[in-house]
Image (spheres, rainbow, N blue to C red):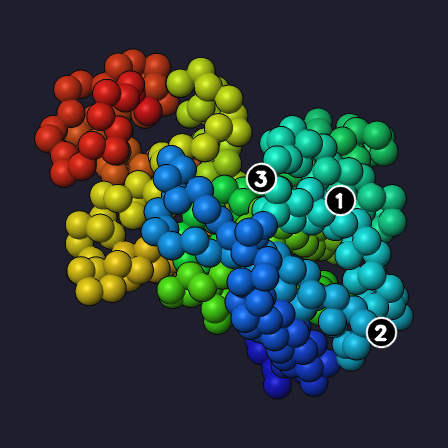
Amino acid sequence: MAIAITGNGMVVEIMNIISPPFIANLLLAFAASLAICLLNIATERWHGRYSLDADIAGIQKVHTKKVPRTGGLALCGGVLAVACYGVFDAPAEAGGDARDTMARLLAAAVPAFVAGIVEDLTKAVSPRTRLVAILASAGLAAWLLGASLPRLGVWGLDGLLGMLPVSIALTAFAVAGVTNSINIIDGFHGVAGSAVVIILAGMGAVALQAGDMLIVQLAAAAIGAAAGFLLLNYPTGRLFMGDGGAYFLGFWAAEIAVLTVVRNPAVNAWQILAIYAYPVIEVVFSIYRRKIIYGTLAGAPDRLHLHSLFYRRFARLRISGKKHPWICNAGVACFVATWIGAATCFSVLFGNTMPAALALVLFQCALYIAVYMRLVRGHWGHCRHPAVLFGLRPQPRPHPVQDTLIAGAHAI
């Protein structure tokens, strides 16, 4: 099968897009992940005292039934099955042995995954410890795979990235940000899983344009594993991915982005940022909101993420879920997936130049803030004033709203 992609007057012919190894690895990861998910649910009565998410009253919780948080075992197991039994198609000139690369990346993911899964089982791992574990995983990836950013397309900064310690430090910071961003958006059925599937599909398309089949196969393994998990996570939430799953998928997605930049000099780093923009904007804005506006801990849970506001101010009011309450919960994934899907398509098709990619990133930032303020205030008034948007000036008295989610809160 061939696909012609036009850009800047040039046509790139990508042959064999859907190759047998790609399909085989995706299906293998899907089957392994689904089997582990089913086993997880079937044995819930034995491990439930450790695995069930019993904190139903938590400030950020919206589910009403105790559900296992150990979906991360299935996600990791799906990718591991591909590493052990997969069929690979990576010619030597494209970057070497895909199985070896996948094994090294799995080894690097161990600290982040273990910290997350232990938190899921014990509820006793501090946010700082989990952050250190993610940074350790990023450092291992830099050591085992040479996964440290050589450039970002930012004048002055690219020169500093020529120094290995600076490159490793900035890469670890970026990887930690993306990894945590997936954990942050993991609050409703199917949101984090579908987001990663779409993002990695976009990264696979970018890698195909660059002729990098190794990256395509890394993405295919995670897409298959996430799809197998989503079959039981969406729409009714029979199983949660938990911190272990969110950290594993987030780390895998982050390292695929880094390796794509490292292995393909022609790929624009801003094009990749445009694909990952939604979760990255969410984590950056959450830190700003908590630290600057409210003066609380950056890792403190709350109900003021964009997807949380969409659920309370739109889904619960506009989507009929009287007979099946899970419908409103599941509706959030449609909102997030539509955003990320559209951004990914535009980024893949038009983001191969820095000006276009930068415009896509800035547009998503502006759209995020506008939609966020609209959901917070219940109206569009003052949403265009920069001082009000960033909490530098108190908001005018808000119009009456239909719930009390932020009653008494200061300007956001």
C-alpha gap between disc 1 and disc 2: 30 Å
CA neighbours of label 1 inside 10 A, class few (<14), some (14 to 19), many (20+): many
Going 69% across and 42% down the picture, which residue do you hit? 115
Q: Could you say whether the residue bearing mark 1 is in a helix, strand or loop?
A: helix
Q: Is residue 304 above or below residue 334?
A: above
Whether residue 166 is visible, yes or no, is yes
- Does residue 310 sit above or below 154 in this rendering? below
Q: Secondary structure at mark 2?
A: loop
- Circle 2 residues within 10 Å: few <14, some 14–19, many ≥20: few
Residue 121 left/right relative to 61 = right
Task: Find residue 48 and report its image quarter.
Answer: bottom right
Q: Which residue is mark 2?
A: 91
Is 388 in front, or is 194? 194
Q: CA distance from mark 2 to mark 3?
A: 44 Å
Task: Tell which of 372 and 365 is nearer to you.
Answer: 372
- Residues marked 1 and 2 touching at CB (< 8 Å): no
Q: Nearer the viewer, mark 2 or mark 3?
A: 3
- Give the amino acid at mark 1: Pro
Q: Residue at x 31, y 37 (%)?
A: 372
Picture coordinates of residue 191, whole percent (x, y) = 44, 55
Give left or right: position of 161 versus 319.
right
Of marks 2 and 3, which one's residue comes earlier in the chain? Answer: 2
* Residue beneath disc 3: 123
Q: Secondary structure at mark 3?
A: loop
The one of 336 and 155 positioned closer to us in this rendering: 336
